[in-house]
Image (cartoon, coloured by chain):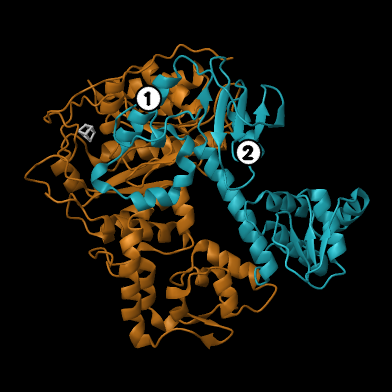
Amino acid sequence: MIYFYDGTQEAFLTALTLSFHDGEPFLTSGNKQLVLGQETAFVRADPEKAKRVEKRLLSFDKDCMHDLDTLLRSGDANKDNVALVYFRLIAEKKRPVRTMLGEDAALAADECIRRVGFEVHRFHGFVRFLQSASGALYAPISPDNDICDLLVPHFRARLPQYPFVIHDVKRKKAAVYDGEHTFPAPLEEAEIVLSANEEKWQKLWIRYYDSVNIPSRERLRQMRGYMPVRYWKFMPEKTRPFTDGEEGGGAPFPPS
Amino acid sequence: MMCYNGGMIDERTLMILTESAKYDVSCSSSGSGRKNEGGIGNGYASGCCHSFTPDGRCISLLKILLSNDCIYNCKYCLNRRDNDLPRATATADDICGLVMDFYKRNYIEGLFLSSAVHISPDYTMEQLFLVAKKLRTEYNFHGYIHVKGIPHASMETVQKTALYADRMSFNIELPSESSLKLLAPQKDRQSLLVPMAQLQRDKEIFKAEKRKGHFIPAGQTTQMIVGASPEKDGTILRLSQGLYRKKGLKRVYYSSYVPVVHDSLLPEVAGGALREHRLYQADWLLRFYGFDAEELLPADGDLPTEFDPKCAWALAHMELFPVEINRAPLETLLRVPGIGARGAQRICNARWYTKLTFEHLKKMRIVLKRARHFITVGGKFYGAAETAVRGLLSAEESRANATQLSLFSMNEIALSALTGEL
Ligand code: SF4
């Protein structure tokens, strides 16, 4: 049976309970092509069922809901099923299965979770804030996984006096810190009036980036390995705004 | 909103002072869990890379000199007195302003401040101290600060700097006293080792007395130039081992010599990147894999070029292999070529529940290209005949080298990626 659901935790847990009676379930939140002759079910969240199974799962592994949250954030097209199989294994073994890497289900979940965690770590470094005229900071990002709100605690701890917005332009959503509270918000486009000095600081940063490089030791493959090109879109040192005509020039920045 | 009146450094000064600092290889921002105390910034214990330059290196800290106007004349150095090059000296507020605005935009993790010996060692150290102090007390900055120690500067200034810095480093520069004398005549071993040892003692006392505040929480590191002088890898690694085990250093960095100035005492060619790479691999074995320098090579020997040091060690000890994946203790797994620290840990975890097969290992992404010659899995051997192993591994290694060179000189991300490889 192929189960479709809306990608929420609650509907996931509901689908999980339904799948217990199923030999070969497959779960997806995407619009997978229907294969003729395959049975399908659209699962709606059943809060009661979800609560019950959550309680049971937590009694087997007190950290498993954290895993679920992480898995459902993954950009992997197969994440829903990876999560389903992983949680079925927890239910089967009645214990944490995190380190049972001999099991395919545990291994697949482990990798998925690790990739999300790694991207969060990378974005702690790769986020680039622009300062607006009001002093607030704005960072557009376009990560593989749905992580923008996971980045907030890190920056909030460092920059408590600065309200900031981390904007996932791909998913059209943002994580907002208003100087006091943190909350998610849908966000299509943002219009930012840059602070008077923003351009100068970005230029200085680009100067720094160019000066600290050792050209005689060029290793572009390594650079791209550690900082994949898909992440460059919002990094001034790679898009090189305000430096028209100079080497390395790219799309104008910030994006309009 | 916080207010501070940091100036804005001009582009030219920034470029000169960066160009002059860039050959220093240490850039790590790890090891400090400093909290934000009502200002801006905190430590990130595992370190964090913010960007990567086309040379493949990580940018973690703003690496800059306060001044490149040097009274010393170290022969290998771009900033030596006799070298004709544009000079600049920044003010403390220039640097502080730069750090604050770069940090706020998340360009950097903090500051790595060094300097040429400007006016005098004491004067220079005092200026470095002032920047660190200003950043912490006036600018309320709690991000990472690494300050270079200036040889021959007053110990007192060095000590008070340690109260504001997360990390300090006195660079050994060259692997032997005689090379130092020849190439950096105004420095001597003692001017580097004595303050290093003093800081270590101070740090221990600071900890033991549970004093308030911080005293270089991320410890000390050092750096030496490899390939400018005749010392062998064996000497270098014994020196590093001593620094780790006796002086409590956190990291020793190796910087392959780059001929930036001409001098009859210096080689005209750059030290090989492969040598630097091998030294970092061996250094890694000393720190995380339970190896002693003495096991890896004789004092007057160099590391082999055709194999990584762990592989070379294993090939010389074939009588200890193969080991059984399902039984060998962690320390033994760590010695299998190709199995890294993370891989070994994952194996130990997984075999607790089930007897591992070769398929399991593959799925767990344990790199088996090298390892298979040194292990059995469930009693079965998947490697080649002992006589063929050498040839296979050497061919494998030269392919790998083409892409992996000097990953080890990199920062955190690279290092964590690599623990699975060695
Ligand atoms: S002291 Fe020596 S190594 Fe340092 S900047 Fe001056 S000349 Fe260069």
In the rendered image, the residue lying farthest to the left is B264
| Residue depth check, mark 1 versus mark 2: number of the one nearer the observer | 1
**Image height of B384 relative to A154, above or below:** below
Name the side, left or right, on which A77 lies relative to B82.
right
Residue type, mark 1 in image: Phe
Residue beneath disc 1? A242
Three-letter code, disc 2: Cys
Q: Chain of mark 2?
A: A
Asked whether residue A57 appears in the rendered view, the answer is yes
Q: Which chain is mark 1 on?
A: A
| Residue B391 picture location, percent across and down | 31, 80
Quadrant location, the C terminus of chain B: bottom left
Rendered hue of chain B is orange
Q: In this picture, is B46 found above or below A175?
A: below
Determine whether the residue tagged by mark 2 lies in a helix, strand or loop: helix
Residue at disc 1, secondary structure: loop
Q: Is mark 1 within 8 Å of ligand 1?
A: no
- Chain A pictured colour: cyan
Q: Residues within 10 Å of mark 1 (few under 14, many from 20)?
A: some
- Read off the residue under disc 2: A148
Whole-number angstrom distance, CA of label 1 to CA of label 2:
27 Å
Q: Position of residue A144 (x, y in %)?
A: 58, 48
Q: Quadrant of ligand 1?
A: top left
Q: Residue, x 15% and y 37% (percent of image)?
A: B185
The circle drawn on residue B54 is none
Kindly check if marks 1 and 2 are in contact, taking CB atoms under 8 A apart as contact.
no
Whether residue B156 is visible here, answered yes or no, is no
